[in-house]
Image (cartoon, helix red, strand yellow):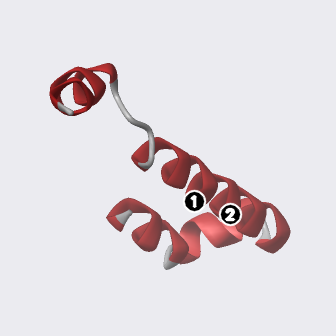
Amino acid sequence: KEALDELENSKLMRETLGETTFENFLREKRKEWDLYRTQVSEWEVNRYIRRL
């Protein structure tokens, strides 16, 4: 998340990609991060679900 926050404040990336492409890229990367961080790993299932 911190990297995405830094990216959002990057004037260089915004100028390099252009406003529209930059905003689209940032939006998709935030979606990707949200999907990643909400995944339940096999280890978590084995560790916690089986204890119930």
SS at mark 1 in the image: helix
Q: Give, as a three-letter code, the residue at label 2.
A: Arg
| As drawn, 33 above or below 1 | above
Q: Work out how far the residue at label 2 is from the one at label 1, CA to CA, in angstroms.
A: 5 Å
Label 2 residue SS: helix
Query: Does 36 sit above or below residue 26?
Result: above
**Rendered-image quadrant of the N terminus:** bottom left
In-front residue for pair 41/31: 41
Percent position of residue 31, x then y? 62, 55
Instruction: Look at mark 1 in the image and give the residue it sits on.
Output: 30
The residue closer to the viewer here, 35 or 12, is: 35
**Residue at position x 51%, y 73% from top?**
10
Task: Work out which quarter of the rendered image holds the C terminus and state it.
Answer: top left
The x and y percentages for residue 15 are 69, 71
* Residue 8 in picture, x, y percent from top left: 53, 74
Residue 18 position (above or below residue 38): below
Does the CB distance between marks 2 and 1 fall below 8 Å? yes
Query: In the figure, is residue 19 to the left or right of 16?
Result: right
10 Å crowding of disc 1: few (<14), some (14-19), many (20+): some
Q: Residue at x 56, y 69 (%)?
A: 12
Residue 16, position in %: x, y? 68, 62
Q: Residue at x 52, y 54 (%)?
A: 34
At x 59% / y 53%, what residue is drawn? 29
Asked where in the image residue 21 lies, by quadrant, the reply is: bottom right
Residue extending furthest right?
20
Task: Give, as a three-letter code, the residue at label 1.
Answer: Arg
Q: Residues within 10 Å of mark 2 (few under 14, many from 20)?
A: some
Q: Specify the label residue 27 is tagged with.
A: 2
Left or right: residue 33 versus residue 24 is left
